Amino acid sequence: MEIKHEEGRIAIYENNMVIGECDYSVSNSSLIITHTYTDPILRGQGMAAKMVDEVIKIAAEKNLTLSATCSYAANYLEKLKTRKE
């Protein structure tokens, strides 16, 4: 299994097939997570969280405001925010 940073997404590959992805868009000073998907074989293993964490790193490195229209990512970001408070 390999996690790759690609234009506008983080993808998980196995045997050259995408089995997970976290899509995002960048506009001005914002990064928006728009979609997260993991193949059913990955669910419950924390792979979606790993992909969102990679996007969080990208936003931090580029000093971008982070938000999500994807429900999974929005919930994950809210949980992180709550833990910090």
Image (cartoon, rainbow, N blue to C red):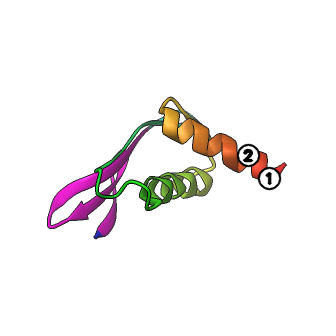
User: Which numbered marker is on residue 81?
Assistant: 2
* In-image side of 67 versus 34 (left or right): right
* In-image side of 24 versus 38 (left or right): right
Where residue 52 appears, as percent x and y from the top left, is 50, 51
Say few, some or many: other residues with alpha carbon within 10 Å of mark 1 (under 14 / 14 to 19 / 20 or more).
few
Along the viewing direction, whichever of 13 and 55 lies nearer the viewer: 13
* In-image side of 53 versus 51 (left or right): right
Where residue 82 appears, as percent x and y from the top left, is 77, 45
- From which residue to which does the magenta span run? 2-24
The three-letter code of the residue at mark 2 reads Lys
Q: Main secondary structure of the magenta part?
A: strand
User: Which numbered marker is on residue 84?
Assistant: 1
Kindly identify the residue that appears in the image at 80 percent across and 53 percent down.
84
Along the viewing direction, whichever of 9 and 28 lies nearer the viewer: 9
Along the viewing direction, whichever of 80 and 56 lies nearer the viewer: 80
Kindly identify the residue that appears in the image at 50 percent across and 39 percent down.
72
- The residue tagged with tag 2: helix, strand or loop? helix
Q: Quadrant of the N terminus?
A: bottom left
The three-letter code of the residue at mark 1 reads Lys
Q: Residue 67's quadrant in the figure?
A: top right
Q: Are marks 2 and 1 in contact (CB under 8 Å)?
A: yes
| Above-or-below relation of 52 to 4 | above
Where residue 49 appears, as percent x and y from the top left, is 50, 55
Along the viewing direction, whichever of 6 and 72 lies nearer the viewer: 72
Kindly identify the residue that appears in the image at 42 percent across and 59 percent down.
47
Mark 2 → mark 1, Cα distance in angstroms: 5 Å
